[in-house]
Image: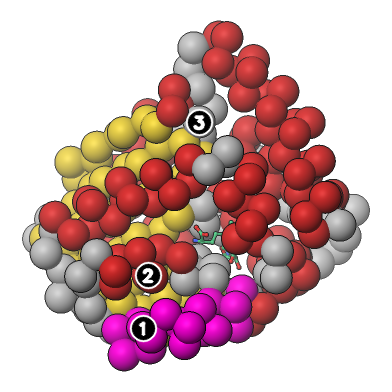
C-alpha cells in the first residue's frame, strides 16, 4: 500500500505532518467537512452511531476523534463512558469546547494520543469506532492491531471511511468531485489548499470494500460487514473480535 503524505517533499514523517496539518485546519474542520460531504456526513455518522448503540456497549473508544463529533452523537443517543483519542491538540481543543457547550463533559473524556500506540490495557472496550481516521494513520496495520488488542473479546469495531464508488459513472463523478471540488471548498474555508489536496488524494487511494475487509481479517477481525453509503462514496464497516 502506498503511503500518501500531506507533503511529499518534506522529510518529516507522515504522523508529524498529519498532526501539524490537523492542528492548522482544526478551527474550520467541522464546517468544511459538512460542505465537502454535501451534508451527507451527518447521515453516515448517524448510521455508525446506530451500529454502536445496537452493540449495547458499557465502555467506548472513538479513535482519531478530531473535534469529538462522533462521541457527541453517541452521548446524545444515550451512550456513556466514551473516550475520544486524537493526535491533534488543536482538534481536541475544539472538541473540549464543544463538550462544555453541550454539557457532555461527564459522559465523554478526550485524550491526546496515538491510535498506533494506545495507552490502554488489553480487552478494555466493548466498542471502538473510527471515522475518516484510518487513511491518516502512518502504519495502518499497527493501528488496527492496537484496536484489536484493546477491544474486549466479543467487542465490535465500527469504521466510517471514504471509499471509491464501484460503478463507472459514479466513479468518474466522484473523482472529479474529490480532485476539483474538495480542494476548492477546503481552500475557501481554511485558506489551506494543500491539506485538502492531501485529503482528496488519500481518499482516492485508500483501500476500500473487499480490500479493506482482507486487511481487517488479516489482523484477526471476524464477520466483517461492508455497508456502502451513497453509491460507495463512503463505507461503514463493522466487525468483531471473537474470543
Ligand atoms: C479527518 S479527521 C476525522 C475526525 C473525526 N473522526 C470526524 O469524523 O470528524 C482525522 C483525524 O485523525 C487524527 N489522526 C490521524 N492519525 C492519528 C493517529 N495515529 N492517532 C490518533 N489520531 C490520528 C487526526 O489528528 C484528525 O483529527
Is 41 drawn above or below residue 140 in the view shown? above
Is 186 drawn above or below residue 176 in the view shown? below
From this viewpoint, is residue 29 visible? yes
Residue 233 image label? 3
Quarter containing the N terminus: top right
Q: Residue at x 11, y 64 (%)?
A: 56
Quarter containing the C terminus: bottom left
Residue 150 image label? none
The span picked out in magenta is: 91-108
Residue 71 image label? 2
For the residues marked 1 and 2, what is the alpha-carbon distance in whole angstroms?
Answer: 9 Å
Q: Say left or right for 123 vs 12.
A: left
Q: Are marks 1 and 2 in contact (CB under 8 Å)?
A: yes
Q: Say left or right for 54 vs 134.
A: left
Mark earlier in primary sequence (1, 2):
2
Q: Which residue is mark 1?
A: 104
- 149 or 22, nearer to the observer: 22
Mark earlier in primary sequence (1, 3):
1
Question: Secondary structure beneath disc 1?
Answer: loop
Q: Residue 6: x, y in percent?
A: 77, 54
Query: Per the image, is 190 magenta?
Result: no
For the residues marked 1 and 3, what is the alpha-carbon distance in whole angstroms?
Answer: 31 Å
- 17 or 171, nearer to the observer: 171
Mark earlier in primary sequence (2, 3):
2
Is 138 drawn above or below residue 61 in the view shown? above
Disc 1 under 8 Å from ligand 1? The reply is no
Predominant SS of the magenta segment: helix
Q: Residue at x 68, y 47 (%)?
A: 199
Question: Secondary structure beneath disc 2?
Answer: helix
Q: Are marks 2 and 3 in contact (CB under 8 Å)?
A: no
Amino acid at each position: 500500500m502506498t503511503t500518501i503524505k500531506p507533503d511529499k517533499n518534506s522529510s518529516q514523517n507522515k504522523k508529524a505532518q498529519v498532526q501539524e496539518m490537523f492542528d492548522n485546519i482544526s478551527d474550520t474542520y467541522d464546517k468544511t467537512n459538512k460542505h465537502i460531504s454535501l451534508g451527507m456526513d451527518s447521515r453516515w455518522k448517524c448510521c455508525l452511531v446506530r451500529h454502536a448503540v445496537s452493540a449495547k456497549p458499557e465502555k467506548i473508544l472513538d479513535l482519531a476523534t478530531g473535534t469529538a463529533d462522533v462521541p457527541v452523537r453517541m452521548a446524545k443517543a444515550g451512550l456513556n463512558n466514551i473516550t475520544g483519542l486524537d493526535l491533534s491538540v488543536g482538534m481536541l481543543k475544539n472538541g473540549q469546547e464543544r463538550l462544555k457547550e453541550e454539557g457532555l463533559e461527564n459522559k465523554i473524556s478526550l485524550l491526546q494520543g496515538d491510535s498506533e500506540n494506545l495507552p490502554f490495557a488489553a480487552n478494555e472496550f466493548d466498542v471502538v469506532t473510527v471515522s475518516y481516521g484510518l487513511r491518516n494513520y502512518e502504519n495502518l496495520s499497527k493501528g488496527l492491531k492496537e484496536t484489536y488488542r484493546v477491544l474486549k473479546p466479543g467487542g465490535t469495531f465500527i469504521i466510517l471511511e471514504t471509499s471509491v464508488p464501484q460503478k463507472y459513472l459514479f466513479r468518474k463523478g466522484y473523482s472529479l468531485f474529490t480532485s476539483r471540488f474538495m480542494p476548492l471548498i477546503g481552500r475557501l474555508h481554511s485558506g489551506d489548499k494543500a491539506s485538502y489536496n492531501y485529503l482528496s488524494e488519500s481518499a482516492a487511494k485508500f483501500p476500500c470494500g473487499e480490500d479493506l475487509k482482507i486487511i481487517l481479517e488479516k489482523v484477526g477481525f471476524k464477520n466483517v460487514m461492508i455497508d456502502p453509503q451513497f453509491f460507495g462514496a463512503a463505507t461503514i464497516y463493522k466487525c468483531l473480535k471473537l474470543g
